[in-house]
Image: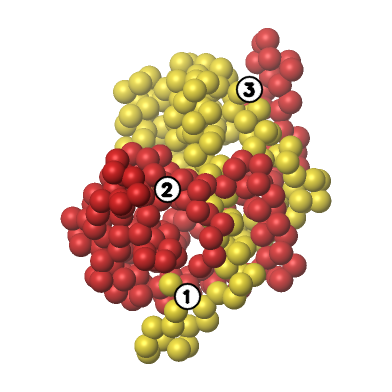
Chain colours: A yellow, B red
Amino acid sequence: VQEVPAGSQEVRWLEPLELDAWRSFQVLQARLNAELARDLSTCSDLSYPDYVVLVALTDRPGAQMRVQELAGRLGWEKSRASHQVTRMVSRGLVYKCPCRADRRGALVAVTEQGRRAIRDAAPSHVSAVRRLFIDLLSRDQLVQLRDISTALLGHIGAPEGCCDGP
Amino acid sequence: VQEVPAGSQEVRWLEPLELDAWRSFQVLQARLNAELARDLSTCSDLSYPDYVVLVALTDRPGAQMRVQELAGRLGWEKSRASHQVTRMVSRGLVYKCPCRADRRGALVAVTEQGRRAIRDAAPSHVSAVRRLFIDLLSRDQLVQLRDISTALLGHIGAPEGCCDGP
């Protein structure tokens, strides 16, 4: 795709370093997500999407938020978040309740079973994150990665609620 | 999830810098993928999965590879790659042909229509990658990101074929 199609001479195609950085970043996220998903499915009853939804909710006081906000926080389309929530409701991991502040929006909240599921899954997942990511990086690299991610999110726009602490 | 459950005192939970680096990296990839997918669906007839499949195939001399290898290269489960290929076959973007070297495996190859589709989509997609990622980073940051990604992939294991040049 690096060939120049007729009529698009103005396109600034990626240069070698740019292409390397972009592609290695993309392959990394794909490989990492695949490994973490495999690890979770081996060590717990949660899928990776289940896990990230439960983390997002339990990070929040009251362990609840609106579906729209959940979607933004995870970078998902709202329809994907709705389907995921529906599946998790049917498995007893979360439940929906009316939002008092906004009658149109329902809140998603974590059930006791959901809390137990993530508490059980977390130790092995954190070990996998350490093994595949954190423990392979120096402190300088962690700082670089945090600064790069934060700078990019500052331009792209972080989703609502993403900057709340754990 | 940072609370320590009974019986797992040996878990090394993430420290603040580690947690910041990991979470900002995760939110970044989610937000970036959501923006790039939205941009592609506005500016072309391809979805983001269509696009990355076509890039992976057209990178290869002959523009073809086995489904298994495609899956590895994209970090997808084989079933996800198979479903995606089936959808793309039905839309005329790729076709399947027998693999001469291995009778069990089918090759996926790009059609003329698939080549045209990616040629048409590429300029706007590359502009979006520049706008949301490349042009926001300094040369030093591109080098840091490339080195971090490459180092991590060296440990996780890059998928078959991922280190071929474009």
Q: Which of B14 and A8 is in front in this view?
A: A8
Labels 1 and 3 in the same subunit: yes
Residue neighbourhood size for the residue with mark 2, other residues' Cα within 10 Å, grouped as few (<14), some (14–19), many (≥20): some
- Callout 2: residue from which chain? B
Label 3 environment density (alpha carbons within 10 Å; few <14, some 14–19, many ≥20): many
Residue bearing mark 1: A2
> What residue is pinned by disc 3?
A123
Residue at 24% across / 54% down in the picture? B97
- Pointer 1 or 3: first along the chain: 1
Residue of label 2 = B69
Residue type indicated by callout 1: Gln
Q: In which quarter of the image is the N terminus of chain B?
A: top right
Residue at position x 71%, y 33% from top?
Answer: B14
Q: Residue A113 carries which label?
A: none
SS for tag 1? loop
Q: Give the distance between the C-alpha atoms of the residues marked 1 and 3, in whole angstroms.
A: 44 Å
Could you tell me residue B109's position as x and y percent?
A: 30, 60
Give the answer, above or below, for where B89 lies relative to A74.
below
The quarter of the displayed image where residue B130 is located: bottom right
Count how many numbered circles sit on residues in the image. 3
Seen from the viewer's position, the closer of residues A157 and B106 is: B106
Give me the C-alpha separation between circle 1 and circle 2: 22 Å
Please report, as a chain letter, where disc 1 is located.
A
* Residue A162 shows in the view: no
- Pick whichever, A56 or A47, lies toward us: A47
Task: Mark 1 and mark 2 in contact? Answer it, CB < 8 Å.
Answer: no
What's the chain of the residue with tag 3? A
**Dot 2 amino acid type:** Glu
Residues behind callouts 1 and 2 on a single chain: no
Mark 3 or mark 2, whichever is nearer to me: 2
The image shows residue A36 at horizontal and vertical percentages of: 54, 34
Side of B132 relative to A127 (left or right): left
